[in-house]
Image: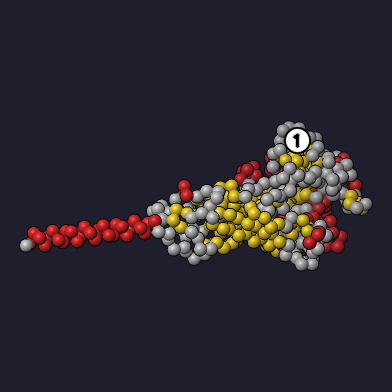
Amino acid sequence: MKKLRILVTMLVAALTLCTLSATQAEARHRPVRPPAAATFTLNAKVLDGGQQIISLTIDTHRLRIKPSSLSAGTFGVHAKGTNPYTSLDPATVFGTFDVDRTVTGVHLDKRGRIVVDLKYGNAPDGTNVDGASTFAWANSEGRNIMLDLAYTVTQKQPITLRDGRSFTFSALKQGRVSDPEVDAYGSGKAQGMKYRLFKPAARGNRPLIVWLHGGGEGGWSQAYNNDLPLIANRGALGFSTRTAQRIFGGAYVLVPQANDYWLNDAAQGYSARLKKLIDGVVKRNHVDRSRIYVVGASNGGYMTPKLAIDSPGYFAADVPIAPVVSFGGTTVLTDAQLTVLRKTPTWVVQAKNDPVVPFEANGKHIYDVVGNALLSAYDDVTWNGVTYNGHWSWIYVARNDPKNDHGQHIWQWMAKQSLHKHFPKHHHR
């Protein structure tokens, strides 16, 4: 009888185990309950043609996802970029969009989050494509404007977890825009102007590079966005890359923003205000006062030599890019003013086919009048097989391409300039 009870007990236990095993197997293949709505980040990168959204990162709530279950067909992405300013005539705003983004792949990052890679890049004429841009152009205002971005992500296929269960998100909500290069810059305000500031990792007194943006990145009646001077092109960001920081031994990068146009100096007093703003940044940080450099493009290419002219002996070097000397029939920098630049090492960069600022009357004119300046005169603006608008010669400086007769590139040349050293000899590219 005792043996019978033991056999019955064993049989019941076996049946229980079988039932549990069947239940567990069924649970493994049963879709899990979707979590609360997950949030995705818009990952951005500044290209030579401006900032674009290049991928999305979905917070997976630490789910253990099987990587092989992810593919380009797992998600669909739709992007809408709208003009937030109702006062602007839609016919004058170029770059808004309402399109499906092309998904090029899906993978997990090191933290196990889902990354949806998107097609991005520059068209042959340098414009942004595929609805990837974060900003548009308002022709009536002559300004870039930040777009309101609305991304919709749809899960088209279930995801498999490592335990074999399938999974579908209940909802996916848009989060913030993340651009590590841009986010590395802090924000500030002085002299009635906003600015962004990159601080080097290196300790001790370090050089300061001042980047002055073009006309499209200034403020206007309805907006004063402090991101545009960093995201419209790589002019400033080039100097905070690892390569540039290594060449300069660590450098601060200061990016002030005009309330309107730097060319409106007569009314706004930008030169004097910028000098005070820079002085304040120098005072509050560990800046090597003998190595302050000013670099600017277009409108900023006017204000760059203007600052050096108005404050001789302050800047170790100035680099005007596609600079404005004569604008709309008005001379904004006289020959008498330009001769003051002989006291400051100057390197002019411009494309000969510049359709906005004629080369001969502007960049070439500075070079001719100053006499001891350097000049990099390019036939056009072509980089990595893409030919851009001839006005965009700042692309070359952002890539450290200009070089003098000794083969020394412009960043290395700048880094060697100091108020304690003699002026460089005359070279021509």
Which residue lies at the image location 73% right of the left edge and 62% below the top edge?
Answer: 83
Residue 301 is left or right of residue 79, and the answer is right
Which residue lies at the image location 32% right of the left edge and 60% below the top edge?
Answer: 23
Q: Secondary structure at mark 1?
A: loop
Residue 421 % position (x, y): 73, 42
Q: Is residue 108 above or below residue 83?
A: above
Q: Residue furthest right?
A: 329
Q: Looking at the image, can residue 315 be seen?
A: no
Residue 280: quadrant of the picture: bottom right
Q: Looking at the image, can residue 412 be seen?
A: yes
Quadrant of the frame with the N terminus? bottom left
Residue 391 % position (x, y): 80, 46
Q: Is residue 77 above or below residue 383?
A: below
Instruction: Name the one closer to the observer, 129 or 363.
Output: 129
Q: Residue furthest left?
A: 1
Quadrant of the frame with the C terminus? top right
Instruction: Name the one closer to the observer, 21 or 141.
Output: 21
**Residue under circle 1?**
404
Q: Is residue 411 above or below residue 188?
A: above
Q: Residue furthest top?
A: 406
